[in-house]
Amino acid sequence: MIIMFKQRYSMLICPQCEFENPKANKFCQKCGISLTHKVCCKCQANIPIDAKTCSSCGAINHLVLWGIISQRILGDTPSQSELERGSSDVVDAHHQLEIEDLSVLFTESRAKTKPLQIKNENNTLKRYVVVKDAVEQLEVVHQGSDSMLLQGKVIDQYPLQKSHLATLQKQQMDLFVELTQAANSSYLSVNQYWNLVGLPTHALPYLILEKYAPTVPQIYDAWQQQDQGVVLLPDRSQWKLLTELWSQQRLPPLQIIWFLDEMAKLWSPLQQISCAQSLLIKDNLRMDEDQTFCLKQLYMDLDSSPTLKDLAQTWQLCFAESGLNHLDNLNHLLDKIIAGEIIEVEQLRGELHNLSFDENQIESFDVYSNISEVNNPQTDREAIESDDNLEAVEQLFFDENEDMLYDSEFEEQATAVVPMNLRSVTDASYTDIGTQRNHNEDFFGVETIVSKLENNNESSLNVRGLYIICDGMGGHAAGEVASAMAVENLQQYFEIHWQEELPDHKTIEEGILLANEALYQTNINNSRSGSGRMGTTLVMALLQDTQLAIAHVGDSRIYRLTRKQGLEQLTLDHEVGQREINRGVEPEIAYGRPDAYQLTQALGPRDSNYVRPEIQFVDITEDCLLLLCSDGLSDNELIEQNCLQYLEPLISSSSNLQDGLFKLIEFANEHNGHDNITAILVRIKLKPNF
């Protein structure tokens, strides 16, 4: 049997405009970009299109992924001569892929065969290639009489190009929505989705569990062709193991309970799609750079569905490997599960809720201390319930109104409500004149004050950040003056009026109106009238620890990106088209008007009786990325359509925020570029407060 790593590409797809070019072309027929060379992401040198690293600066110019490839052939096994020839003729009509048992494709094999490299002669575009290092070749992790499953590292040489999966999702949006809502249906029906969507069956659990990202990895790309199905995921093989974290760091017992609760939350969703096995493989339990619990990949259940007893035994193995056997209360809980006293996940999470530790043990806990030195005098139920710490533990982990119910629609699971503190706040800012303007009327301001306290027992971070972008208007130098005046007035105002707490609605509104009055009075003093008056838009964010206030006037925007909710536009443009939509007009009609993009509000042209800034308050409850920008960046839905490539990677602490912003604005100049472009990125990372 010959293994072919292939995709349905008979043409060369331009990585910039996605135009289909004949394979012989060296340049795109539509946009003229080279199809044989690309620009280095760091030094901008021209390098071969398939280069993994830049010969000039050494920068990595590809993306490493984790590939899971299913191969099942029915019929006669090809001869050795056929294998040696590597003939693609082996894959013919009587060797069609037929997947009936999903476990064939997911189950972790205990006996692994030697590594096997997958060929890619039919991958015309040569977008995806297997890492060539002998140690990193694709490995057969399951092999049966008529099927095998391979996995390993795969390189995407065109990471900015739209994936096959993204194209399918756009073309068949309704079908994908139906699939994500089908978690309660019989899992036997998934084959009908596979046939309709044209994806390998082992891609479906990832699509169904998309709402649980990033804990469950999101599919990067997937396709099915004849006897081979390919699923590509983010490569998490180098992420730290959960047991490594537990072994190497001093973790308070409450944090251990929190990690267990994170796994318990996933039990029901994974069971419903027969992937509970994913929580039972120690090598699959990983931590990202921010110590967030994640799965490396999904594994299908074996013949029988795992029980909580299996989960408890896995936890026992993790405890033993990490040197945590002295946590008596937790080990007692695991013994109860294994003995069959706890059989439902609701009971388990209830026990985690009620579990408490002796106050002395919490204060003196040390994973490197001798087990015999750790004492826990309270072991019976009555002692635990009477412990003074119980109320604190209850408030720390579970909302008092939580009903601990799990419904069949995958509604939001009962979640351990752990107070969240700031881990870090990072910002980046940049403004660009654009490609068609001779001066820059945008102006931005960033002020961040960081206070850090750290000692042997605790560390805390307090942040106060003021982020402002103004997009001026008025012709000649007037727009530049207006935007700069507005930013400077607001900075001076909040320097005085931002004291201990985040400013309230009235204080923020007053500052904006005072900035408007300053601009308006300047117009009057200079006898400007009508369209000759200078003005500016405004978008502003005020951050104090985990509290956020945002305000805007005009069409400059704020976006928020989180792993759970994705991209959200937090502001609505103050323009004629959006005003008509607010009045109930259809968007196509509203933006069909010739004056659709005319501003309905701005600072400066009119007195404050006509200015109504929109102000919102938001609590930061998860890691997020804030983007403030002028319309030169947001026009033509550039943010919405390119979020995956340019913004999502920046949520990670390992990414360089300033470099990411440069790349985004450079891309905007290529595809918009008609206006000045200004943006501020703020990355907010949280950590549980234990």
Image (cartoon, rainbow, N blue to C red):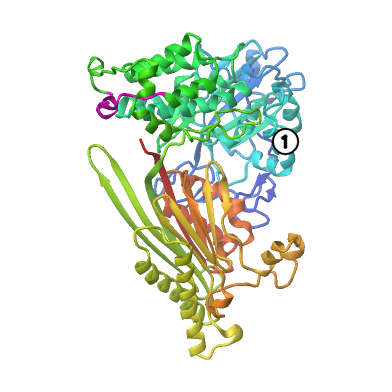
Residue 44 visible? The answer is no
Above or below residue 648? Residue 191 is: above
Residue 625 visible? The answer is yes
Q: Is mark 1 on a helix, strand or loop?
A: helix
The count of marks equals 1
Above or below residue 434? Residue 478 is: below
Q: Residue at (49%, 21%) from the top-left corner?
A: 348
Check the picture and name the quadrant holding the N terminus: top right
Q: Which amino acid does label 1 sit on?
A: Glu
Q: Which of 146 and 355 is in front in this view?
A: 355
Dividing the picture into quadrants, the one containing residue 328 is: top left
Q: Provide residue 73's location: percent of width, then percent of height.
A: 69, 17
Left or right position of 64 against 245: right
Q: Which of 655 and 600 is in front in this view?
A: 600
Q: Magenta residues, as a range? A: 355-367
Dividing the picture into quadrants, the one containing residue 199 is: top right
Classify mark 1: residues with Cα within 10 Å, few (<14), some (14-19) or many (20+). few
Above or below residue 453? Residue 195 is: above
Q: Provide residue 122's location: percent of width, then percent of height.
A: 65, 32
Q: Provide residue 395's location: percent of width, then percent of height.
A: 42, 35
Q: Nearer the viewer, residue 553 or 121?
A: 553
